[in-house]
Image: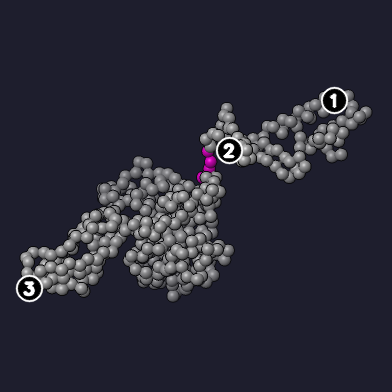
């Protein structure tokens, strides 16, 4: 018989336990001098079995089936209790401590994402809101706002065309969850040879996720296979006014460092965002946490980005922490920073002074917005249009042309973006 070198080698059939650690135990075979040796070997094997921080129980008939209890994280002189109810599932009765990765896996196990719509700090990460338009041409070395909440900075040496698109037939649930969402398309007709494209999303409040691990998840692709790279950063901007601290830039990790990958479109990674304790904020109240997604395009093709989320903790084990919100809610989040408006008033042009109207905003804006009048073509007998605003309303007025009726009809935008 083989040597019994550990407790796991022992047999329930006494007659087959013919040695312990190579010391013979057979009838009329064991020498008197081996009695002490046998006891010593048994004691050593029992000690080895119980001393490990990982306690293992093996199936009696299949030694490859193992139940392992890892006690490493339990503090000294502390008891942890496992209760087995009638259901047969273990239930911990004491408070437990998990790593960020273990927390993410636990959320994935119970599909916690469906309960956490507001855990995603990114608004309009599905690119469903485009109040500012759906097509933008950004020359080399220029930047422009595109879909709500997304500033695109083109530092390459070629012009980029940005479009905000609904999902097309090239998307499916198998490739990207929630295939009814939109996506941002970045296209180059000529391949850049230098520079990057930065997709910038500014989250109000530099204290957001400060001192925490955060997880970025997004889906990306390129229309043709290439090895162009992608990366990301968390930028803490402490605002303007007074003497605030300078920006703090922290690079995040990614599971795959290229925009295109034949196997998956999902990119996910974490970043440890520094604490803001002791930092000085600007007095203008425009501090923010900036998510900076960096593309390094070197191909004449189109690149797609969508379903972007930034959540607290290590969520890399989750299938998708995006947790979509209703479109009406997403629109309201966007309108805190940018809105469009329209209004019309008819009045007697013989009256003196100004004629106008006040437009109450559907969502209070972050600050008093900068107003732009984009269209007055419907106005009649109106001149010298005046504009005033506050975070809750805007007032549009004009001086009537003498005589007859005056019609003031205006369209415009309100901008309180960071």
The dot on residue 394 is none
Query: Label 1 neighbourhood size at 10 Å, few (<14), some (14-19), many (20+)?
Result: few
Disc with the residue nearer the chain's start (3 vs 1): 1
Query: Label 3 neighbourhood size at 10 Å, few (<14), some (14-19), many (20+)?
Result: few
Q: What separation in Å lies between label 1 and label 2 (alpha carbons)? A: 45 Å
Q: What element carries label 3?
A: loop
Q: What element carries label 1?
A: helix
Q: Point out the frontmost of discs 1 and 2.
A: 2
Disc with the residue nearer the chain's start (2 vs 3): 2
Q: Mark 1 points at which residue?
A: 35
Residue at x 54% of width, y 34% of height: 94
Q: Do the residues labelled 3 and 1 touch (CB within 8 Å)?
A: no
Residue at x 45% of width, y 50% of height: 116
Q: Does the magenta stretch include residue 100?
A: yes
Q: Does the magenta stretch include residue 207?
A: no
1 lies left or right of 161? right
Look at the image and tell me whether residue 108 can be seen: yes
Image quarter of residue 8: top right
Q: Give the range drawn in magenta.
A: 97-101
Image quarter of residue 160: bottom left
Q: Mark 2 points at which residue?
A: 91
Look at the image and tell me whether residue 101 can be seen: no
Question: Split into 4 quadrants, where in the image is the C terminus?
Answer: bottom left
**x, y percent for residue 356:** 15, 64
- Residue at the right extreme? 28
Q: What separation in Å lies between label 2 and label 3 (alpha carbons)? A: 83 Å
**x, y percent for residue 327:** 39, 60
Instruction: Tell me: residue 380, above or below residue 23.
Output: below
Q: What separation in Å lies between label 3 and label 1 (alpha carbons)? A: 124 Å
Q: Mark 3 points at which residue?
A: 403
**x, y percent for residue 86:** 62, 38
């Amino acid at each position: 018989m083989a040597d019994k070198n550990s407790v796991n080698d022992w047999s329930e059939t006494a007659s087959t336990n013919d040695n312990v650690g190579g010391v013979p135990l057979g009838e009329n075979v064991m020498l008197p001098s081996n009695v002490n040796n046998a006891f010593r070997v048994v004691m050593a094997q029992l000690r080895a079995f119980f001393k490990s921080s990982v306690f293992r129980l093996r199936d009696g008939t299949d030694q490859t089936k193992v139940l392992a209890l890892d006690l490493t994280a339990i503090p000294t002189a502390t008891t942890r209790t496992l209760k087995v109810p009638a259901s047969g599932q273990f239930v911990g009765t004491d408070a437990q401590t998990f790593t960020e990765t273990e927390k993410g896996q636990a959320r994935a196990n119970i599909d916690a994402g469906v309960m956490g719509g507001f855990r995603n700090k990114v608004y309009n990460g599905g690119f469903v809101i485009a109040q500012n338009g759906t097509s933008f041409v950004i020359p080399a070395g220029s930047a422009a706002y595109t879909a709500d909440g997304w500033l695109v900075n083109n530092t390459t040496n070629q012009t980029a065309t940005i479009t905000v698109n609904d999902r097309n037939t090239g998307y499916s649930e198998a490739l990207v969850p929630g295939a009814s969402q939109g996506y941002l398309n970045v296209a180059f007709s000529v391949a850049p040879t230098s520079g990057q494209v930065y997709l910038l999303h500014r989250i109000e409040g530099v204290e957001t996720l400060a001192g925490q691990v955060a997880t970025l998840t997004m889906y990306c692709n390129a229309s043709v296979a290439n090895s162009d790279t992608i990366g990301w950063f968390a930028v803490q901007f402490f605002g303007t006014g007074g003497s605030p601290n300078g920006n703090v830039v922290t690079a995040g990790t990614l599971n795959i460092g290229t925009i295109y990958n034949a196997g998956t479109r999902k990119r996910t990674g974490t970043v440890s965002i520094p604490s803001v304790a002791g930092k000085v904020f600007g007095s203008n109240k425009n501090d923010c946490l900036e998510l900076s997604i960096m593309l390094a395009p070197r191909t004449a093709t189109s690149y797609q980005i969508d379903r972007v989320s930034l959540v607290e903790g290590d969520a890399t084990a989750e299938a998708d922490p995006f947790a979509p919100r209703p479109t009406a809610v997403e629109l309201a989040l966007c309108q805190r920073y940018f809105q469009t408006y329209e209004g019309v008033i008819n009045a007697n042009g013989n009256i003196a002074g100004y004629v106008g109207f006040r437009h109450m905003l559907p969502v209070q804006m972050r600050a008093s917005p900068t107003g732009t009048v984009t269209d007055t073509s419907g106005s009649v007998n109106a001149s010298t249009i005046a504009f005033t605003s506050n975070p809750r309303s805007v007032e549009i007025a004009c001086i009537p042309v003498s005589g007859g009726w005056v019609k003031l009809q205006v369209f415009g935008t309100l901008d309180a973006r960071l």
